Amino acid sequence: MPSFEDSLKKLESIVDKLEKGDLALEESIKLFEEGVGLSAACKKELDEAEGKVQILVKQRDGSLKAEPFPSEDS
C-alpha cells in the first residue's frame, strides 16, 4: 500500500491532468475513478490520524498516552 504522501502526490497529478481537459473521455473517467479511490484512502488515513491525536489529548491527568486507534477493520 502506498504511503499517504505518495497517494496525495498521485491524486494531485490526476487533478492536474483532469483540469487541463485535453484527455479522451475514457481516460478522464479512468483517472477520475482512480482519484476517487485515492481520495478515500487519504481521508481514511487522515481520520485515523485525527483519532490518534484525540486519544493522546484526552488524558485526564494531563499526561500524554498513546493508545491504539480502533480501525474499521478491527
Image (cartoon, grey):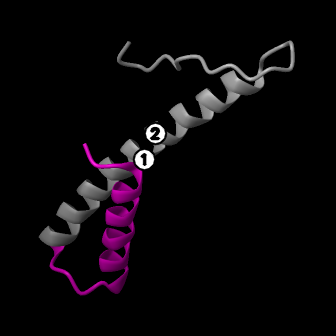
Tell me what residue is drawn at x 61 percent, y 35 percent: 50
Residue for badge 1: 42
- The stretch drawn in magenta includes residue 67: no
Q: x%, y% of residue 45?
A: 46, 39
Q: x%, y% of residue 56?
A: 70, 25
Image quadrant for the N terminus? Answer: top left
**Residue type indicated by callout 1:** Cys
- The stretch drawn in magenta includes residue 24: yes
* Number of other residues with Cα within 10 Å of mark 1, as a class: few under 14, some 14 to 19, many 20 or more: some
Left or right: where does residue 29 sit relative to residue 44? left
Residue for badge 2: 45
Left or right: where does residue 9 sit relative to residue 22? right
Tell me what residue is drawn at x 37 percent, y 80 percent: 19
Camera-side residue: 12 or 58?
Answer: 58
Q: How many marks?
A: 2
Camera-side residue: 9 or 23?
Answer: 9
What predominant SS class does the magenta segment belong to? helix
To which quarter of the image does residue 59 belong? Answer: top right
The magenta stretch is 1-25
Left or right: where does residue 58 sit relative to residue 40? right
**Residue type indicated by callout 2:** Glu
Distance of mark 2 from mark 1, alpha carbons? 5 Å
Image quadrant for the C terminus? Answer: top left
* Number of other residues with Cα within 10 Å of mark 2, as a class: few under 14, some 14 to 19, many 20 or more: some
Tell me what residue is drawn at x 34 percent, y 55 percent: 7
- Which structural element holds mark 1? helix
